[in-house]
Amino acid sequence: MQLNTILNRVEYFKSFVYGKAKWVDDADRPTIEVNIEPRKNGRPICSGCDQPAPGYDRLPARRFEFVPVWGIAVYFIYAMRRVECPSCGVKVEQVPWCDGKNQLTTTYRWFLAGWGRRLSWKEVAGAFHTTWQNVFRSVKHAVSWGLAHRDMEGIQAIGVDEIQWQRGHKYLTLVYQIDEDCRRLLWVGKDRTAKTLLRFFRMLGKERSARLRFVCSDMWKPYLKVIVKKAGQAVHVLDRFHIMAKMNKAIDEVRAGEAKRLEEDGYEPLLKHSRWCLLKREENLTEKQAVKLSELLQYNLQSVRSRLIREDFQRFWEYTYPACAAKFLDEWCTRTMRSKIEPMKKVAKTLRRHRDLILNWFRAEGAISAGIVEGLNNKAKLSMRKAYGFRTVKAIEIALYHQLGALPEPEFTHEFW
Ligand SMILES: [Zn+2]
């Protein structure tokens, strides 16, 4: 069987034929070059207007990298024709395996992008003897194709979240679709200002925004304001994950302050290594952490009391009726206000202030599942780590869309990856 037979099976071109294949002798790794020629009587297509046009001349032969096989690099060799197009003038022809000035064939780019979803871009570059830049550009190409071809109809529930991408308050705003049957990243934007989120709604468009039924977010003021303005008809739910995260942050603050005070008073460092045993829920504690917690429980520590206040609050999520939940919330806030623990009192004040939006959790009647935003948020953090070392906003944005956007891909006759 000849190489042409395989190539025609996996990548067939109507107007071009594969010619001779040969080894390249002086390459630094095993390399095959395959000639491509236009079919006889096949008219070149103008790259300006996609129409057949009379030939003009031919450029010197170029190399186009294809998917490697058995550790052998594969290149197509082809001399591009130029056309004299009646509407565009003299233009380079369009070829089906590549677009523009790219040195990588389109199939190879999709191949690299496909692996770039499974491995870090650095690992992909290493595995296929190519550069990080090539992998990055391939992923970028896959993302822009996917964004241009995705279906944006039928979005009913969205979740707005922020993620820190660099130290020093550098944030990105992420908007997810969180419908039962479709969960994906819809949009990424720099910063977390009102303007950022307004840009999302502009992208979504007035009509689609008006059809949203649920919007889930944290208590970040600029977001709250924009959501009221742009999707006022939707039930706005303060997300459970964000509320509990706020409480954990408060516990952390209490612990840090108390640890410092204890040390100053000359007590043994009782609260050392206690962070996770205070923050984690009972059932998630390791044995060591559980022992530490039972030790701490013997003392009347603010840290421990804060933890109990949070555990008490977990009951809130188990209510079915908004009225009962409201009663519990009010009582919890009163109890917490009496605790004399400042950071926890602050949480109680915040919850009081956003009482209605929090109770919307119950009005949404389970349309928004508990862990959804948290799950997506964790995946987003993981994707960011995978693009490590290249912390430009653009690279992170592309990595996030690629991993979480559930973007469509064109159909290929052969599956290369
Ligand atoms: Zn043309």
Image (cartoon, rainbow, N blue to C red):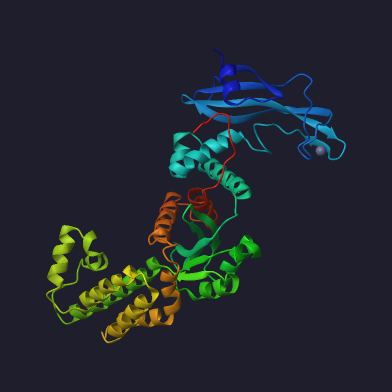
User: Relative to the observer, which residue lies in front, 301 or 33?
Assistant: 301
- What residue is at 64 percent from the left and 38 percent from the top? 102
Whether residue 62 is situated above or below residue 381 in the rendered picture: above
User: Relative to the observer, which residue lies in front, 248 or 158?
Assistant: 158
User: Relative to the observer, which residue lies in front, 400 or 170?
Assistant: 400
Position of residue 255 measured from the top left corner of the image (x, y, whole percent): 25, 74
- What residue is at 78 percent from the left and 35 percent from the top? 46
Whether residue 398 is situated above or below residue 263 in the rendered picture: above
Position of residue 115 measured from the top left corner of the image (x, y, whole percent): 47, 39
Which quarter of the figure is the N terminus placed in? top right
Tell me: 273 left or right of 348. Answer: left
- What residue is at 43 percent from the left and 56 percent from the top? 376
- What residue is at 78 percent from the left and 40 percent from the top? 48
Position of residue 41 measured from the top left corner of the image (x, y, whole percent): 79, 20
Whether residue 391 is situated above or below residue 302 in the rendered picture: above
Q: How many marks?
A: 0
Q: Quadrant of ligand 1?
A: top right
Tell me: 290 left or right of 376. Answer: left
Please say whether residue 174 is visible from this viewpoint: no
Tell me: 365 left or right of 225. Answer: left
Please say whether residue 276 is visible from this viewpoint: yes
Position of residue 138 measured from the top left corner of the image (x, y, whole percent): 56, 42
Of all residues shown, which one is farthest toward the top? 1
For residue 276, which quarter of the picture?
A: bottom left
For residue 202, which quarter of the picture?
A: bottom right
Whether residue 316 is situated above or below residue 99 in the rendered picture: below
Of all residues shown, which one is farthest toward the right? 86
